[in-house]
Image (spheres, grey):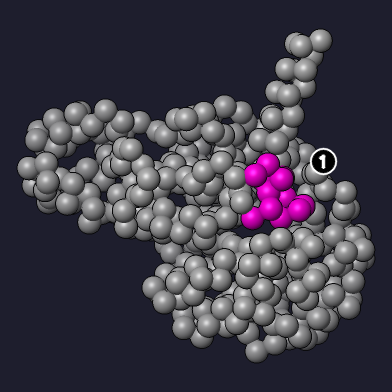
Amino acid sequence: MSVEGQATVGLRDLTFEETRRRLDEAGVRPVHAAALWAVLYGDATPARLPAPVRRWLEAQADEPADSCVVSDRTASTDGRTEKYLLRLGDGQEIETVIMGYPGRFTACISTQAGCAMGCVFCATGQMGFARHLTPREIVDQVRHVRRVLSARGDRLRNVVLMGMGEPLHNYDHVMTALSIVTDPRGIGLGPARITVNTVGVVPAILRMADERQPYHLGVSLHGSTEDERARLVPVSGRWPLSDLIEACRTYGRVTGRRVFFSWTLIAGVNDTVAHASRLAALLQGLDAHVNLIHLNATPGFAGADAPEAAADAFRATVREAGIPCTIRQLRGIDVAAGCGQLKAERMRRSRSSAAQTMR
């Protein structure tokens, strides 16, 4: 896949086969691609590269420097969640979260600076869209998390694309990045350990199915009728709920994989037993798992998190219909670990500081 619209395409924007072609075009034997990738993604040093490859790499001005620099870090009192604000080369900032669970660590990765989907309760959706991330900006988040965990003797187990942005709005760059992350010559994380989450970009879901992409699909649903969902997820006006569910059925039928549905519980909006019953009816016949998520409060949304009793009743109703349903563990609420919250807080502090300066 090509990286469209970029003035400079770096080595970590390329799949392994594209790396081989880049070497071949430069007059370097493509057989050295594996050794080069060991430097880009492993522990090998450039000094161990064959001389022609080393000289060629030294001539690449932007390689192998990281595309992301830490500009802020917060650690939760739960002792298992860390959020990083990473600054990109053009000054844009994105968020990456390390979430710790018993026996495993998961990286929550961003795919865009901002988001164009406009989900009303999401801090990223409230700030609007800036641009797509490049493959290397996505890959470098994974490298960053792996480096942090390795330094303390831990290992990255799972990656979820549920950070800032809509992954399937940035389809080509995301799939290029994931091919690098899962390539055993690259980062080598198994495809079964990666989940691509979407608010429902129907054509891209069908494309994932048609291309037999080997990753889990997660769908942020939040509403069980067209009107109910449209009030929370404006993009559903473009891709209606009926089309979305049919695309998920196609994906499940073609790939044989379960679809994971996320449902953010909002008190008095979508948290009743009636909502749960409609959701269960909507998903009947589909190999599905429902993840209930407690609402992360944001200044731009007046809704409140559902009470625990409502969450428990919702879960029980979905389970009684024969659909697996879990309530996702809260992680990092005290460090604004919800999507876009740390960047939004940084933006608010900057505006406040600017206002104070002007007085």
Q: Measuring 72% from the left and 50% from the top, which residue is drawn there?
A: 122
Percent across and percent down for residue 165 are 58, 50
Judged from this view, the residue extending furthest toward the bottom is 285
Horizontal side of 101 relative to 355 (left or right) equals: left
- Identify which amino acid the numbered label 1 is placed on: Pro
Q: Is residue 130 magenta?
A: no
Percent across and percent down for residue 103 are 59, 55
Query: Residue 49, located in which quarter of the rendered image?
Result: top left
Q: Could you tell me which secondary element the residue under label 1 belongs to? A: loop
Judged from this view, the residue extending furthest toward the front is 238
Local packing at callout 1 (Cα closer than 10 Å; few below 14, some 14-19, many 20+) is few
Q: Is residue 119 magenta?
A: yes
User: Could you tell me if residue 178 is visible in this image?
Assistant: no
Q: Measuring 29% from the left and 33% from the top, which residue is drawn there?
A: 63
- With respect to residue 296, does 144 lie above or below? above
User: Could you tell me if residue 346 is visible in this image?
Assistant: yes
Query: Residue 299, located in which quarter of the rendered image?
Result: top right
- With respect to residue 244, does 120 lie above or below? above
Q: Which residue is mark 1?
A: 299
Percent across and percent down for residue 357 are 75, 11
In this view, the residue in front, 127 or 185, is 127
Horizontal side of 34 relative to 339 (left or right) equals: left
Horizontal side of 236 relative to 190 (left or right) equals: right
Percent across and percent down for residue 84 are 59, 36
Give the magenta-colored segment's residue range: 117-128
- With respect to residue 206, does 176 lie above or below? above
Q: Quadrant of the N terminus?
A: bottom left
